Image (cartoon, helix red, strand yellow):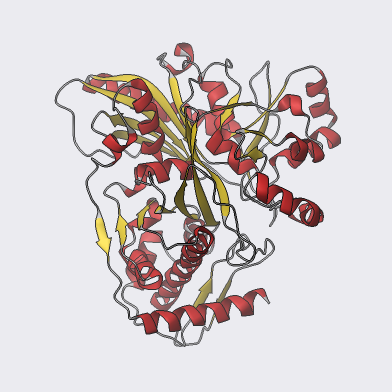
């Protein structure tokens, strides 16, 4: 069943961008109208499989079918409401790699999701030689993401993949490349700056592939997609497939689109998206602010490239936020829903000696790089209640997000000027109040927190299509959201953060 989200019903003919947001756990599409609001959003969940503790995979065909279904539902709603769709825009999860057949259009293997760590140990061998080089050129270390190494290994180990390459039938790309290919009927094999940056093979200043590093991993350079700006003309959607032929006018990585939609149009303006993982991004200007020694896990990247101008950003993330809540509910059955966790947490009294949750369910990147780290729930006793555990879970998530904020600010060399929050998990009042207390600054939950990444790429496409004269025009016209003001004293905040650092040290050794 689709999950519509509407703010109002248009009473007159309107223009809109068909916006797609393909996330890690679900795909949605909706209409971003010419006033910047979102109408007629449809949603499909996407399965994520974990064959073992290191591997994370998805079915590319499921991603495409879900995308097609939600797009058709949004277009049907547009037709009923008399809305004219003038362009399409795409937002996707980043660094999830896919190999498919050029002739059949079918995937050859499961997609390897950005959370996958199967080659983390292998990549350690590259760090001493390549980390200094890559930090200066791509804004990120070797890390644990390995889309190019994964594809190279498949070519080396699977005869059918090697045969497809020899026959000129093998196509490689991330999720944006896969969906651009499908939406244009196979006419366009491309990726954009904000998506390429997350692969670890993108030269920040040159807007080009780092062919030396990519080839060093054994990846054939002839498989690389064309590099484009985020607002490039990516071709027209295939009318026979989608039901409408319009320009595919923008494609962005999900966090980049959210940063744009949440107003990160100038240096120092930041956002926090609480979804499957938690991401803190801040715009740094037209020159990249590179990672600093001693500050782990903060990455420099293109915020987005509009025409021939790139606005750069810094990003830090933790992999287990919404995924931790779903794990507690769906896999362990400790709670019925993530919402119930928030409701129970609000009823529990503060307990300094009570349970603590360390949400390192898929490794740790900030404040130290530990890809093999695991999570923990400690401090339990016979007096511990479910409400106590719920509070500990949200406090642990809030502390891990605070680590991100502190790391980004330290790398930028200045405090954030503003922090706006979005994403599905940002709907928890208790979590955002706890986070405001820990970071010691006001947080604004935007009026439409769940649709930030959906709107961002649509705004970029809409400027190119003439719906708005500039990004500032549409972004700053959006209504303000709820502001969460810190309630704790600096001394209390310092004690809480010190206790968290002790827990982190104990867990990470």
Residue at the far left: name it. Answer: 11
User: Could you tell me if residue 73 is visible in this image?
Assistant: no
Relative image position of residue 297 (x, y in whole percent) = 60, 59
User: Which residue is found at the position 60% from the left and 36% from the top?
Assistant: 196
User: Which residue is found at the position 55% from the left and 78% from the top?
Assistant: 501
Relative image position of residue 504 (x, y in whole percent) = 58, 75
User: Could you tell me if residue 149 is visible in this image?
Assistant: yes
Residue 464 or residue 317, whichever sits in front: 464
> Which quadrant holds the N terminus?
top left
> Which quadrant holds the C terminus?
bottom right
Residue 233 or residue 58, whichever sits in front: 233
Relative image position of residue 250 (x, y in whole percent) = 45, 28
Residue 347 lies in what quarter of the image? bottom left
Q: Is residue 443 above or below residue 41?
A: below
Q: Is residue 238 above or below residue 214?
A: above
User: Which residue is found at the position 57% from the left and 46% from the top?
Assistant: 48
Count of labels shown?
Answer: 0
Q: Is residue 469 above or below residue 481?
A: above
155 lies left or right of 502: right
Relative image position of residue 66 (x, y in whole percent) = 48, 32
Residue at the far front: name it. Answer: 287
């Amino acid at each position: 069943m689709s999950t519509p989200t509407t703010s109002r019903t248009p009473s007159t003919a309107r223009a809109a961008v068909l916006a797609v947001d393909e996330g890690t756990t679900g795909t949605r599409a909706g209409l971003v109208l010419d006033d910047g609001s979102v109408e007629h959003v449809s949603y499909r969940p996407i399965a994520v499989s974990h064959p073992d503790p290191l591997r994370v995979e998805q079915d590319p065909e499921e991603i495409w079918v879900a995308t097609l279904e939600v797009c058709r539902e949004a277009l049907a709603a547009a037709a009923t409401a008399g809305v004219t769709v003038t362009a399409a825009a795409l937002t996707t999860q980043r660094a999830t790699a896919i190999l498919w057949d050029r002739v059949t259009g079918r995937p050859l293997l499961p997609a390897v999701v950005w959370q996958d760590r199967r080659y983390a140990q292998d990549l350690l061998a590259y760090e001493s030689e390549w980390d200094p080089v890559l930090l200066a050129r791509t804004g990120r270390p070797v890390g644990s993401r390995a889309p190019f190494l994964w594809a190279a290994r498949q070519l080396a180990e699977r005869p059918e993949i090697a045969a497809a390459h020899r026959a000129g039938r093998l196509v490689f790309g991330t999720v944006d490349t896969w969906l651009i290919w499908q939406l244009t009927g196979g006419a366009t094999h491309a990726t954009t700056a904000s998506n390429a940056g997350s692969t670890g093979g993108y030269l920040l200043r040159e807007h080009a592939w780092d062919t030396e590093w990519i080839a060093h991993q054994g990846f054939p350079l002839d498989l690389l997609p064309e590099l484009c700006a985020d607002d490039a003309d990516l071709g027209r959607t295939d009318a026979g497939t989608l039901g409408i032929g319009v320009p595919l006018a923008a494609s962005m990585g999900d966090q980049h689109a959210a940063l744009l939609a949440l107003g990160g149009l100038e240096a120092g303006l930041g956002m926090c998206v609480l979804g499957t993982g938690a991401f803190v991004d801040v715009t740094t200007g037209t020159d990249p602010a590179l990672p600093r020694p001693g500050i782990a896990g903060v990455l420099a990247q293109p915020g987005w490239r509009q025409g021939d101008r790139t606005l750069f950003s810094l990003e830090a993330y933790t992999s287990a936020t919404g995924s931790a809540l779903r794990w507690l509910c769906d896999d362990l059955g400790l709670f019925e829903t993530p919402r119930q966790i928030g409701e129970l947490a609000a009823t529990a009294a503060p307990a300094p000696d009570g349970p603590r949750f360390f949400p390192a369910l898929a490794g740790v990147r900030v404040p130290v790089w530990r890809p093999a780290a695991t999570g923990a729930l400690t401090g339990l006793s016979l007096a511990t209640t479910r409400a106590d555990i719920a509070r500990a879970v949200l406090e642990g998530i809030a502390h891990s997000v605070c680590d991100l904020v502190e790391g980004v600010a330290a790398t930028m060399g200045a405090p954030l000027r503003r922090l706006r929050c979005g994403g599905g998990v940002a709907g928890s009042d208790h979590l955002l109040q706890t986070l405001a207390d820990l970071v010691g600054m006001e947080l604004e939950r935007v009026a439409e927190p769940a649709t930030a990444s959906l709107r961002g790429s649509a705004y970029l496409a809409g400027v190119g299509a003439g719906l708005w004269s500039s990004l500032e025009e549409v972004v700053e016209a959006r209504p303000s959201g709820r502001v969460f003001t810190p309630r704790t004293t600096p001394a209390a905040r310092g004690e809480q953060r010190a206790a968290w650092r002790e827990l982190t040290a104990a867990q990470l050794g």
